[in-house]
Structures are given as C-alpha cells and as structure tokens.
Image (spheres, rainbow, N blue to C red):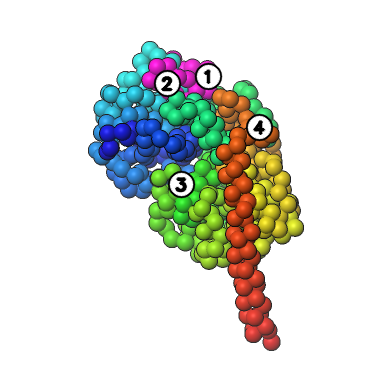
Amino acid sequence: MPASEKVLAFPVYPGVTPLDLIGPLTVLKTPGIGGTRYRTVVVGERAEPLATDTPLGLQPAATFAEMPNPWAVIVPGGGAATLAAAEDGALLSYVRSATAEAQVVGATGNGALVLAAADLLRGQRSAIHWAFREPLEELGVIPADQRWRADGRLHTAAGGTAGIDMALPLLARLRSKAIARFGQLSAEYDPQPPFGRVDPDPADAALARTLRDPGSAPIAAPAASDERLIALVLYPGLTVLDVVGPLQVLTMLQRFAPGYRCVTVWARREPVPTDVGVAVVPDRTFEEVPHPAIVLVPGGALPTIRAMSDPRVRDYVRATAASADLVTSVCTGSLILGAVGLLEGRDATTNWFYSGILEDLGATYHQRRWVEDGNLLMSAGVSAGIDMALHLAARLTDEATARRVQRAIDYDPQPPWGGIDYDRIPRLPRAIRGAISLAAPAVAARAKRLTRAERSKAADTQSVVRP
C-alpha cells in the first residue's frame, strides 16, 4: 500500500451483524480532500461470501493475510454468532497480530467480545450491546454504560447505530469536524425513532437470554405457503446502509412475528458491488420472488440514477408494485419508484440532496423521516430507513412488538453533535444540492420517456391479445 495510505480494517466472520459493520463503514468512507488517504477494507479469513445474521451475504474485499498491518482494526458484532467467533482461532490470531501496532482498536455491537477473547480489554471498560454484558464480564472486562466510549486508542460502541455515533467523532479526528458533519448530512443521520428511546423493562433478562441463545426460545414457524415475503431489492452500486438498516429491523421482527420473512433479491445470485467497497450477496433472484407482500427499494447516488433506466430493476419494481400490499423505499430509492410512474401526484420523500429530481418525477416532496401515501411508504436519506422500518414493524404487528425489536437491536441513537439543522446547512452541501437540482429535468425526462414507451408497449400487447 502507498506510504501515505492508512488502512482501517473491519474483520468479519460468519453470522456478523451487517448494521454493526455497515454503519461505521459508511461514515468512515466519507471522502476528504488532501492530507493522508484513509482506506476502509472489510477482511475475512477467506475472500469469499459469508453468511450474516440476515438474509444478506457479504464478500470480504481482502483476506487477513493481505492486510497484516492496518492502521486501525474495528470488529463488528454478530449476535449469538460472536460467542462462537470469540473462540475462532484464525480470527483471534489476526486480531492479536493486526492490533499490535494499530493506532485505533475498536468494536461495535458485541464485537468487544472478540477483543476481550484476544486479551486486549482485560480490566478495562468497554461499551457493548446491552444483552452481552454478562459474557463480557466473564472475560474480565467492565461493561460501560455509555453508548460509545473512546479511551486512548480503544474505541467501543454498543449496538444499533452506536457504531455510527462512535465513527463520527473518529472521522472528525481523522479529517475534520466539517467533513464529519458532511458525512452525517449525507447519511441524513438525524434519527427519530417512532417510539422514542426504549428503556429497560422486566422482560429484558429473558430477551437477553434469547439473543444470546436463539434456540432457547424457539418460535413455531409457519408453513412456507403462509409466509408473507418482504423483498429488498439490490442493484450494483447501491447505498448498502439503505438496505441493511431496515433489514436488521425486519429480520428481528421475524423472531417475534414469524409470519413475515425477509429476502434480498437481484437479477442473479452473485455478489453485487456497493458504495462502501464490500460486495453483498442476495439469497433470491427476481424470478424467484415475483409477488412479495412488501417490496423495498434502496437508494444510492449515481448508481441509482443508472438503475432508474435499468430494465431489470424497472421491470421488477413495476411488476411487484402491481400486486404488493406495500411498496416502500429508502433514500433515493423513491426516485426509482417515480421513474416507473408510481409517484405521479403522490406525497413522497427522499434524500435531501435529491428532492429536485423527485419533484420533477411528479411527486410532492416532504422533508420528513418517512411519508405514507396509500400503499406507498417512503423514508428520507439512508439512516431514516431504520426509523421507517420500526414504524412498519408496528404497522404489521403492534407497537409493543416494534418496541421489542428496537430493544433487541439496541437502537438508541445519540448523534455526538445532535441532529441535522436543515436551516443552517453549510454553503457547499447547498451548492451540491443545487447542482443536482439543475440536472433533475434531464434525469426525470429520460425516466418519463421510458415509462411512456413501456405503457405504450403494454397497451399494444393488450390490444393484440384482446379477443
């Protein structure tokens, strides 16, 4: 690697929790101008797809052997799988050697268990997912009450989006606070959980045991024919946090309401590149899930503009929307809904930067965390997908169940500098938004031409087959 490059390595293992990985990875990928180059790399024992605790696979970009001396090592959590990972010889050997000279050693979720098993935390305080405090204590570490904690080179965070909370000040240290705030705005990390904070309750001990040992409280699964599928659409270059946030919520919902099941879909079962340099692997193809009960479309930047014209994405979204009970989107995913003609005259939202394109597609833009209009449910930028998914979980079940899901994933967001003040956004982000709005008519016009052509073709086909 170049002498001026500093690598931030994220070691992963089977059963890792995507949100614990992708949250801080998204923040730390925020580009900066000049100075030292920082590069984030997801590393595994082998550079081949591995399972997570959701229906989304991950493919590490490099092996442990290829990244022996990173500048930073941050270990994501993985629910009950981390207990097994804490006994994984190859993983522990890498963590011990890679952290020997690392300037930052971190963990998110219950990833602190791996650091503790590698004997890097003995006698120290560490943040961790609340349900795994006891196993951490058994390894000689003192669980901290903070959502995230920085102590010298050691940075640890609890679950949910605590990794984002931790990564923002770390990015400010690496780059500047202005760049970190820009990263917060890009991800629209202005969290507004629909039920507020979730406080402890008498059932927490039982829930903790279930999270540490899912088999201790088995739930009878419905027959496959009775399950209602929630299809999360993938496409090349997408903002993967758009998918991972709601997927983490809705996968946990399956544990408490097994009548719903999440699937991730793309045209083929093969790795799909994303915005953070790690490929993701769907568990189904479009053809295998033609009629989901709910379809969710994530967003991105330029790749989403391309997806608006991709016939594979357009055909699937349009076809599933015709029969789905709910059509949902995260961030600029709503632009894809608009591109196939689903938002004309409808209330909608999207990432703040892209509101001009949404309006040129015929929608009425609202700057809110999520917007509902009939069977459409759309969230604002990136992290808003988590808040929307909790709202959706309550809509599908009830508020008590949704609050239990929130507690289970340890979603208690606390941005280090508070939320986003949209009335005081700096000049550069406003200029970027303005430039995107200038391009909006051309982007929308192409999408509209494709929609008219598709509708004309469908009408011609119907006239030919009509008796």
Amino acid tagged 3:
Asp
Residue designated by label 4: 424
Q: Are marks 2 and 3 in contact (CB under 8 Å)?
A: no
Secondary structure under the numbered disc 1 in the rendered image: loop
Q: Tell me which segment is drawn in magenta.
A: 138-158
Secondary structure under the numbered disc 2 in the rendered image: helix
Tell me the distance, in whole angstroms, between the alpha carbons under discs 1 and 2.
15 Å
Dot 1: few (<14), some (14–19), or many (≥20) neighbours within 10 Å? some
Q: Between tags 2 and 3, which lies in front?
A: 3
Tell me the distance, in whole angstroms, between the alpha carbons under discs 4 and 1.
29 Å
Q: In which quarter of the image is residue 323?
A: bottom right
Amino acid tagged 2:
Leu
Dot 3: few (<14), some (14–19), or many (≥20) neighbours within 10 Å? some
Q: Do the residues labelled 3 and 4 touch (CB within 8 Å)?
A: no
Tell me the distance, in whole angstroms, between the alpha carbons under discs 3 and 4.
27 Å
- Please tell me which residue is depicted at 54% across the width and 45% down the height of the picture: 242
Tell me the distance, in whole angstroms, between the alpha carbons under discs 2 and 3.
33 Å
461 left or right of 164 in image:
right
99 is higher (above) or lower (below) than 325: above
Amino acid tagged 4:
Arg
- Which circle marks residue 136 in the picture? 2
Q: Which of 92 and 200 is in front in this view?
A: 92
Amino acid tagged 1:
Gln
Which of the marked residues, 1 or 2, is nearer the chain's N terminus? 2
Residue 205 coordinates in the image, percent (x, y): 55, 24
